[in-house]
Image (cartoon, grey):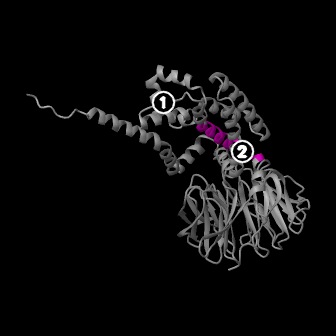
Amino acid sequence: MTAIGPPDDSGHSADQRSRAAVLIWALVRLPALAMLVYLLRQPILNAIEQQFDVFYVTDLVVGVVSTPLARVISGTGLFAVLLLLVFCVRRLSPVVSYSILLVTAGAVIALSFNLAATSLLRALFVELILAFNLAPSQFVGQLKKQFPRVWNTLMLAGVGVVELLLWREYWQWVSHLRRGHRSDTSSAGWKVAAAIPGLLLTSLVFATVIRPQRLVAFEQMMRMSSEVQLVESGVSINWIEIDPTRTYLYVTGHDLPRLRRYDLRDLSAPPMLSDVSTGGAQGFAYDPRANEIYAFNTFTRQLLYLDATTLERKRVVDVPDLSPGDLWVTVDPITDTLTLSSEADLEIGVPFIVLDRATGRVVGQSDLETGNVLLHPTKPWLYLTFFRRRNEVMLYNLENRSVMHRTPADQRAERMVFSRRRNELLVTSPVESRIMRFDADQLHLKGYIPATLGVRAIAIDEVRDLLFYGNIATGQLVVIDLNSNKRLKTYYLGPWPRTIQLNVESGTAYVSSRGALYRVDYAGSIPVH
């Protein structure tokens, strides 16, 4: 007699394990992808810079992150409209309700984008997401029946695509894996409930792709504190500098064809303009000793000497060999030299040139393609960082025209500030979310100050021992206590803070940005140590 044992369930167990593995993959793949992107952020940024315009990509990210509240309100408004539409047409036939929903929603989305000065191509993208996610179940069901293997492969391998275009069907597929059966899709209530994920996704994409120009003012109205004053808006402002008497603020920027001088005693008065075009220069150097300002016109390839009192042109020096790209100008009173350092967007010409200030004669040059420069306050030393191509911080001696020290640094190191009290060079690291601390004489790394992703512009109030940094992404000005490295205050300004200048005596910060110039009265809200 043959023994009869328990039935063989190995096939059933294997099927369960396979189902569990697919379910785990379905649930963790997007979080895993997000984590992978974060871990590989540096190589990804390098690839983007090599293949695309990194500025355009950064602009898209900054526009979203710097206006979160306005976008949440916009997305919530669209979701409410779409949900109301779905509820109203729920008892109509699938084709009729689907047609009414797409036409009405398309009109709402197109009108909203038009009011927000956003391309209608983006509106079409949002409409396509809605159309795919709300496609009648009977039509999608036919595809599943006719092409079951293709459908399951799409659900498994279409990471990002199915979550964007087929959210309802994707979760129906996940639910089937988990429960082993499909939901009843015949009731009107199910139609409304099943549409909600697609409506949420459509509203999220809608809020994300709206251009920020019309949202910034709304965001500022809701989040800007009473300590912040909007001095100028609607223009791209780069470098700013206060004169030693704390009376005037000099301003330049890509949207400003002429250098400006604001009277800090009356910011409502129109600024004084230079008598010559600077070509929208990114930066300038101010020399109080000679009472001169130096700006380079990238279009004419000329270095302009301007009188700091009248802003009239005093002299022009041709510098035809300088590499094209955003430019930094520094003036050193000890060696009486001017340094022109280009980011070298194109690797042609000479990116780093030292001139004799009095004669305009070239006295030194190098292949250093700097991202930022900072002059030592009492020595003829120039600190250099590199946004691309080098992961270093350098100390350049202007007396013998050579590099004194160099040390490894984070990729895409950015702006710098000198701390007299600690004899340290502080360098912002936007991608690594920190501020690097270097010994100012030898460039030995001493540690880090925690910051947020996007930290860029930086300044120090030595009297109060406060560190200020502007976050290019969130549009915030953050104040840190340098004794404890703790955040004391955060001010919302607007996207792309670029340069911070402090009037320590009055406890006032002036911040330039891509779109505005701000004045922040911080003394009243932050106590002196």
Give the residue pinned by disc 2.
Answer: 74
The image quarter in which residue 438 lies? bottom right
Q: Amino acid at mark 2?
A: Ser
* Residue 248 visible to the viewer: yes
- Residue 486 placement (x, y as % from top left): 60, 70
- x then y, percent, for residue 271: 89, 60
Q: Main secondary structure of the magenta part?
A: helix
| Secondary structure at numbered mark 1 | helix
Q: Amino acid at mark 1?
A: Leu
Mark 1 or mark 2: whose residue is earlier in sequence: 2
- Relative placement, left or right, of 151 versus 3 is right
**Residue 145 placement, left or right of 301:** left
How crowded pointer 2 is (Cα within 10 Å; few <14, some 14-19, many 20+) is rated as: some
| Range drawn in magenta | 196-214
Cα separation between marks 1 and 2: 32 Å
Disc number for residue 154: 1
x, y percent for residue 300? 80, 48
Farthest residue, direction top: 146
